[in-house]
Image (tube, rainbow, N blue to C red):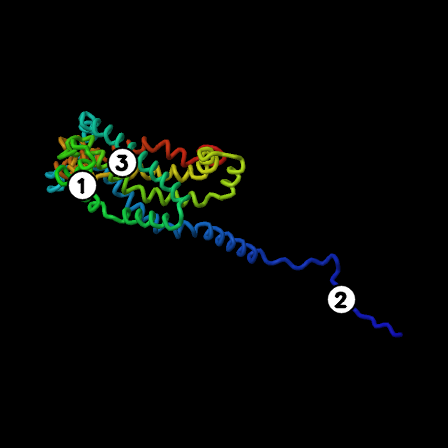
């Protein structure tokens, strides 16, 4: 047999491929660095237009109100285009007015009562929808959507008719049930009763959003947790505390925070009912701001009230904000 020899030209072990020129490798590194920096900056560049628009539409009015609060801006200055700086005089005028403190306390009490009632009833309806049959649940959801879609002024007008002193359906129904003292009863004879009717209207308008939001959170809870609680013999209240509450606590706090923001700034319903009456007993801070700024043309004082409203609202919601910023590792 003839052996076939093959010859292979192998590179010596000590040979090393020639290195690239320094200018080539340096250029590649620079391109990589430039590409990496651009990739990191790209999300911010994409968000920049929306961020600038938000700052312009929301941030600028806030700054404008804050600046106006240090000016004397009545109708005369507004027409003449004069800029008269008064420092903290507007704040002193507002804080020395006893009516401001009375209205502030009334606004806080009104807000707390409405928020507690609306969130509590929204949570109750959300829990009820979880156990209802599908057809009954759909009917309830359609009814809440219709209530939610009703314009504010239209629903306020309906409530005015319902609580009318002479022709309201509520007084007539109470009289038919044997409560003769409600014949011709005026639900708007005092600030407390007026705000109670307004609060009932706001709760009715807020329940659909709260119920749908909390029901969405309840649907996301795994049924295995409820089955395990049932096997352990937990009662309904124990199941709510051990299973439902931990799962929806963050969502409940968020909707409570939103409700506080919305209900603190309620203006249309109060103004349409009695324009803050009778005798200013149902006036809240938004109504007071309107009276000072629009009715009396004291725009500087109204701006000072707006700034103080933001401070009061910040103090009210501080606890909610702190809890919303909590993390699993600790508190921020």
Classed neighbour count for the residue bearing mark 3: other residues with Cα under 10 Å, few (<14), some (14–19), many (≥20): many
Say which of 180 and 314 sits in front: 180
Question: Separation of disc 3 and disc 2 at Cα?
Answer: 88 Å
Q: Give the residue at x 21% y 40%.
A: 269
Q: Position of residue 66 (x, y in %)?
A: 24, 36
Residue to which mark 3 is pinned:
264
Q: Position of residue 253 (x, y in %)?
A: 38, 37
Residue to which mark 1 is pinned:
169
Q: Position of residue 307 (x, y in %)?
A: 25, 34
State how many labels appear: 3
**Label 1 element class:** helix
Q: Nearer the viewer, mark 3 or mark 2?
A: 3
Question: Separation of disc 1 and disc 3 at Cα?
Answer: 29 Å
Report the side of 251 relative to 106 (left or right): right
Query: In the rendering, which numbered label is found on residue 9?
Result: 2
Please, is residue 8 above or below residue 36 in the view? below
């Amino acid at each position: 047999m003839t052996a076939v020899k093959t010859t292979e030209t192998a590179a010596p072990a000590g040979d090393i491929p020639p290195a690239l020129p320094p200018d080539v490798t340096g250029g590649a590194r620079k391109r990589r660095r430039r590409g990496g920096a651009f990739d990191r900056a790209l999300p911010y560049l994409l968000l920049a237009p929306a961020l600038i628009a938000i700052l312009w539409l929301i941030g600028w009015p806030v700054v404008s109100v804050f600046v106006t609060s240090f000016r004397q801006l009545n109708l005369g200055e507004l027409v003449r285009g004069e800029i008269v700086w008064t420092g903290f005089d507007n704040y002193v005028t507002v804080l020395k007015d006893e009516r401001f403190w009375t209205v502030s306390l009334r606004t806080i009490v009104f807000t707390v009562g409405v928020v507690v009632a609306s969130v509590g009833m929204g949570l109750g309806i959300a829990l009820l929808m979880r156990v209802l049959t599908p057809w009954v649940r759909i009917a309830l959801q359609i009814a809440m959507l219709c209530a939610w879609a009703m314009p504010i002024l239209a629903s306020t007008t309906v409530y005015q008719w319902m609580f009318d002193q002479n022709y309201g359906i509520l007084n007539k129904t109470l009289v038919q049930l044997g409560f003769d003292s409600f014949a011709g009863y005026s639900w708007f004879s005092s600030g407390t009763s007026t705000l109670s009717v307004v609060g009932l209207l706001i709760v009715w308008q807020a329940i659909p959003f709260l119920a749908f939001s909390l029901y969405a959170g309840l649907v996301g809870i795994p049924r295995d947790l409820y089955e395990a609680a049932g096997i352990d013999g937990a009662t309904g209240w124990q199941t709510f505390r051990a299973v439902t509450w931990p799962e929806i606590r963050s969502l409940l706090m968020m909707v409570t925070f939103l409700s506080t923001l919305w209900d603190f700034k309620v203006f249309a319903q109060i103004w349409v009912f009695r324009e803050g009456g009778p005798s200013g007993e149902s006036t809240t801070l938004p109504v007071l701001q309107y009276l000072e700024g629009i009715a009396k043309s004291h725009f500087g004082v109204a701006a000072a009230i707006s700034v103080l409203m933001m401070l009061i609202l910040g103090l009210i919601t501080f606890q909610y904000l702190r809890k919303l910023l909590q993390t699993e590792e600790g508190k921020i």
